Image (cartoon, grey):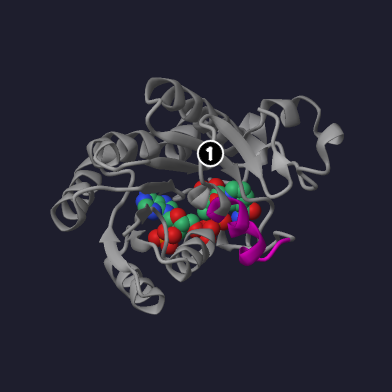
Amino acid sequence: MTITVITGANKGLGFETARRLIEQGHTVYAGARDPERGVRAAKALGARPLLIDVTDEASVAAAAETVRAEAGHVDVLINNAGIAGRAAAAGDQTAADLQHVYDTNVFGVVRTVRAFLPLLEAAVAPSVVNVSSGLGSLAVNADPAAHTDILPAWAPLLAYNSSKAALNMLSLVYAQAYPGITVAAVDPGFTATDLNGHHGTQSVGEGAAAIVAAATARDAVTGTFTGSFGPVPW
Ligand code: NAP
C-alpha cells in the first residue's frame, strides 16, 4: 500500500493530484487546513481527511502523529499547499508581505518535512515532491523572454517568486542531506485555479500531470526540477 500525504488537497492542483493518485492505487491523506472543506474533499475523492495547517507547528505535528498511528510510514509527501500573496508592485511589498507568503510556501514545507521525516525514513523508497513554480527559477527571472516556452506569463511577484526560489533551494539541500529520500521540485505550469483567479492557461488535469509524474516515478533521480515539458532550469 503506497501511503501518500498531500497538503492543500481540498481544491485546485492538490485535489486533482489526489484524485489521480487514488486512481493509481495510492492511499491518500488529503490535507486541508479547514476541517469542513477537508472532509468534503476527502469524501469526494475517497481519500482519508487530514487536518493540517502548514503555518501551525502544532497542527503539522498532530497531522504527522495521525498518519504515524494509522499507517506507520509515508511513501510520498507532496508539499502542495501554497499561496500567492498580495498583488502589489515589488517596491510596495513589505517584509510582512514576504513573511506571510514564506510562512506557507517556505516555512510550511520546513515544518511539514521535519514532522514527517521519521515516517518517510520508515518507508522503503520514500519521496518528497515540492510543488514549486517556474516563477521560482533564477534562470527564468534572469531572462524571462528567453524562457517563454516554460513560462508564457512571467510576473515580477517579489514575495511569490522569491518564496519558490527558496523552496527550490530547500529541495536541493534536503536531497543532499537525505540521499535515501528522492526529493523533487516540480513546476505544474500556469494552471487555472483560485490561486490566480483562474487566469491560468492550463486545466488542473494538465497542471497536475507533472506532480503525478514525480510522485509515481520509478528509480527517480533526486534533486531535480521538472515541469510537464521536462527539466526546468534552476
Ligand atoms: P489553490 O487552488 O489556491 O490551492 C491551494 C491549496 O493550498 C488550497 O487547498 C489551500 O487551502 C491550501 N493552503 C493554503 N494555505 C495553507 C495552509 N497554511 N495550510 C494548509 N493548506 C493551505 O492553488 P493551486 O494553484 O492549486 O496551488 C497549489 C500549488 O501549486 C501551490 O504551491 C502553488 O504555488 C503551486 N503552483 C500553482 C500554479 C498555478 O498556475 N496555479 C503554478 C505553479 C505552481 P484553502 O482552500 O483552505 O485556502
* 34 to the left or right of 209: left
Q: Position of residue 40 (x, y in %)?
A: 35, 76
> Is any part of residue 83 visible from this angle?
no
Q: Is residue 215 above or below residue 1?
A: above
* 155 to the left or right of 86: right
- Quarter placement of the N terminus: bottom left
Magenta-drawn segment? 202-212
- Say which element carries label 1: loop
| Residue at left offset 24%, top offset 40% | 122
| Residue at left offset 45%, top offset 27% | 175
Depth order, front residue of 97/57: 57
Q: Which amino acid does label 1 sit on?
A: Ala
Q: In which quarter of the image is residue 137?
A: top right
Identify the residue position indicated by label 1 in the image: 220
Q: Position of residue 26 (x, y in %)?
A: 39, 62
> Is any part of residue 44 visible from this angle?
yes
